[in-house]
Image (cartoon, rainbow, N blue to C red):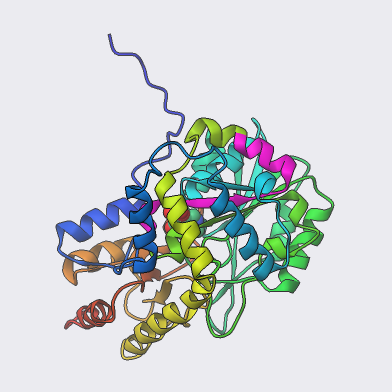
């Protein structure tokens, strides 16, 4: 007998990242769709991990994370954001930011609660909310007419918040648009949340990838936002090691207590030698995270220089390792059609922006990942130039 399987996530299929990466493989295309670097993490870091693999750090780590890594993160938070964090009571190492986001949502959201996300939104948010029994409310970002850049529509965000709102999720520096928040923006967010009892998840995985001399304004810096916040980040982005799936959550003690109740029974603990290796590396090279921005800015500039000879419209990304392009001067086809067609015919894979949104409002825009070596980026733009394509 076959039991009827009533899916808890009926709307969820295979993610676009998997679909596009598979299509890129099948078509032998350059894969600028999924966000992963084509280069290795620093050798000084992998050396420390190898060392710990060979020197006994191979059994369960403590549930909240290895003390040395939590302590290194507390030092980093003090230096970068001026906040003194209790490494024992406020930091938890988790299996990538994805697990951190999931654990925070499960810890906070109850059946029938509303959760506000800003579209385009990272794809793990809504399924995690649904599994917690919550309802996701999507608030689109606004698009600036002059530059095509995205920014928060504060009025729409305010209008979306009501007495049922349990959680707001923000992600700045923002994937896929590269939008960032200023100190004044954080003040605005704090003013909106002030009259509500909503918690905040701040997904800051691109905290160190921000360009043109701008600095990342973390929720960790904001006294009014901090007491209601889970701040989540990922070593995958900062260390060019997305495959390691190690991240962390910083939250005030009462929130961390609830977070750990979920984390404890989701993964319990994270890979021990990796944690020790990252801790050693952060202590030995505390400036490494701050060098990442210059590294990626050079990549962005290289990619944008190449794009200047195309008929795409674009504004150089302010952050992250993604560049948006608007192909609207070339065709009116939908972004998904164009992304698929260019992967098959031109052999360059990208991500259509509409997949990050409840209602397609992002027009003729595609996201390209420029975390690749310069030759790959050069070849990708050359392929986009093939006769008939541009
Ligand atoms: C905005 C955002 N949040 C979270 C994640 C997940 O990070 P991790 O790979 O550490 O789980 C990603 C990865 O692409 C991301 O872009």
Give percent across and percent down for residue 44: 38, 67
How many tags in the picture?
0
User: What is the quadrant of residue 181 in the picture?
Assistant: bottom right
Within the magenta stretch, is there residue 167? no
Give percent across and percent down for residue 23: 22, 56
Return the residue nearer the eye: 179 or 10: 179
Give percent across and percent down for residue 32: 30, 68
- For the N terminus, the image quarter is top left
Return the residue nearer the eye: 252 or 224: 252
Against 138, residue 187 (above or below) is below
Which residue is painted at 18% across and 64% down in the image? Answer: 344
* Residue 103 in view, yes or no: yes
Which residue is painted at 41% across and 84% down in the image? Answer: 298
* Residue 139 in view, yes or no: no
Within the magenta stretch, is there residue 259? yes
Residue span colored magenta: 241-260
Image position of 372 (left or right of 218)? left
Which residue is painted at 71% across and 47% down in the image? Answer: 199
Return the residue nearer the eye: 124 or 387: 124
Against 280, residue 268 (above or below) is above
Give percent across and percent down for residue 341: 23, 65
Which residue is painted at 81% across and 61% down in the image? Answer: 191
């Amino acid at each position: 007998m076959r039991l009827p399987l009533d899916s808890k996530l009926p709307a969820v299929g295979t993610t676009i990242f998997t679909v596009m990466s598979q299509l890129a493989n099948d078509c032998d295309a350059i894969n600028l769709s999924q966000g992963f670097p084509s280069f290795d993490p620093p050798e000084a870091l992998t050396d420390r991990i190898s060392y710990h693999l060979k020197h006994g750090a191979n059994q369960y780590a403590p549930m909240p994370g290895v003390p040395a890594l939590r302590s290194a993160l507390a030092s980093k938070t003090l230096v970068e954001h001026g906040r003194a964090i209790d490494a024992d009571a406020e930091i938890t190492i988790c299996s990538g930011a994805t697990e951190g986001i999931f654990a925070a949502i499960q810890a906070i959201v109850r059946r029938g609660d509303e959760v506000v996300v800003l579209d385009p939104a990272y794809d793990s948010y809504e399924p995690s909310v649904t599994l917690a029994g919550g309802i996701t409310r999507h608030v689109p970002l606004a698009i600036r007419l002059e530059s095509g850049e995205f920014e928060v529509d504060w009025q729409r965000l305010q209008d979306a918040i009501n007495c049922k709102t349990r959680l707001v999720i923000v992600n700045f520096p923002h994937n896929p648009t590269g939008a960032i928040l200023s100190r004044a923006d954080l003040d605005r967010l704090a003013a909106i949340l002030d009259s509500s009892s909503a918690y905040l998840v701040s997904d800051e995985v691109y905290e160190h990838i921000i360009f043109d001399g701008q600095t990342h304004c973390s929720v960790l810096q904001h006294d009014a936002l901090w007491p209601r916040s889970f701040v989540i980040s990922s070593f995958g982005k900062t260390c060019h090691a997305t495959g390691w799936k190690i991240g962390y959550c910083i939250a005030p003690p009462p929130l961390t207590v609830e977070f750990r109740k979920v984390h404890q029974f989701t993964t319990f603990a994270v890979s021990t030698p990796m944690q020790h290796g990252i801790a050693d590396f952060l202590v030995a090279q505390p400036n490494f995270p701050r060098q990442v921005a210059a590294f990626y800015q050079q990549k962005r500039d290289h990619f944008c220089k190449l794009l200047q000879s195309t008929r795409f419209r674009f504004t150089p990304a302010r952050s992250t390792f993604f560049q948006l392009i608007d192909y609207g001067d070339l065709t009116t086809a939908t972004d998904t059609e164009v992304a698929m067609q260019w992967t098959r015919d031109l052999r360059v894979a990208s991500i259509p922006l509409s997949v990050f949104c409840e209602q397609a409002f992002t027009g003729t825009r595609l996201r390209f990942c420029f975390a690749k070596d310069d030759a790959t980026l050069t070849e990708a733009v050359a392929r986009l130039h093939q006769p008939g394509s541009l």
